[in-house]
Amino acid sequence: MSTDQTADPNDQSAAAPAAEDAGGPADPGRRRLMVAACVGAGGLITVAVGVPAAIMFIGPMLNQDPAPWRSVGQLDSFRIGETVQATFANASPVPWSGVTALTAVWLRRESEQEVTAFAVNCTHLGCPVRWEADARLFLCPCHGGAYYADGGVAAGPPPHGLNRYPVRIQDGDVQIQATSLPLK
């Protein structure tokens, strides 16, 4: 056996040109094209998801318009020490919402010039609370949440007291500063 007839198993010099000529996996042009296509598609997906998400989080910070003040009634129509429900136009109604564009608020007149406005929704899961005048409690029918007359938690699962709206009185008109959701 001669040395020139023995094939070196590590010698791929004869097979390599055939694979490159056939456009096989060693073709650097095709590989670069596939990498560029994958990176480009990943970039487009990132932009398509990232831009709306960034707008959702940053947009409210850029909105400098204060929440509008909504009239809920004349001061003379509320008796001192009494808690009553009043309605006002929702802060974010849609044109076709009709009567559902109205939302409610619990008003408590504390003194001659002081009124407190509570959101009607329980802070646990948002069910509407009702005022029980005899017990002097706000009660939530969904999970048994109870609130004192000042809005503080009396019992049940609510994590904190009833949310409040800022209130002002202008020319005898009681107004609340209505956002889409009341803030504590």
Image (cartoon, grey):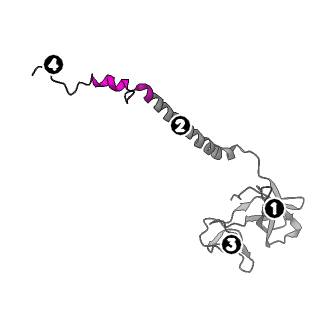
Mark 1 and mark 4: Cα distance apart in space:
95 Å
In the image, which disc is placed on residue 148?
A: 3
Q: Position of residue 88 (x, y in %)?
A: 81, 62
Earlier sequence position, callout 3 versus callout 4: 4
Q: Earlier in the sequence, mark 1 or mark 3?
A: 1
Distance Cα–Cα, label 2 vs label 1: 45 Å
Amino acid type of the residue tagged 3 in the rendering: Tyr
Q: Is residue 31 above or below residue 122?
A: above
Q: Which residue matches tag 2? A: 41
Q: Earlier in the sequence, mark 1 or mark 4?
A: 4
| Position of residue 166 measured from the top left corner of the image (x, y, whole percent) | 76, 58
User: From this viewpoint, is residue 59 visible?
Assistant: yes
From mark 3 to mark 4, how far is it between C-alphas? 101 Å
Residue 9 is marked as none
Distance from label 1 to label 3 (Cα)? 33 Å
Closer to the chain start, of discs 2 and 3, is 2
Residue occupying the far bottom of the picture: 134
Q: Quadrant of the C terminus?
A: bottom right
Q: Which numbered disc, 2 or 4, marks the residue that appears first in the sequence?
A: 4
Rendered view: 111 above or below 30 = below
Q: Which residue is mark 4?
A: 4
The amino acid type of the residue labelled 4 equals Asp
Name the residue nearer the viewer: 94 or 183. Answer: 94
Vertical comparison of 92 with 109: above or below: above
Residue for point 65% across, 43% down: 55
Magenta-drawn segment: 11-31
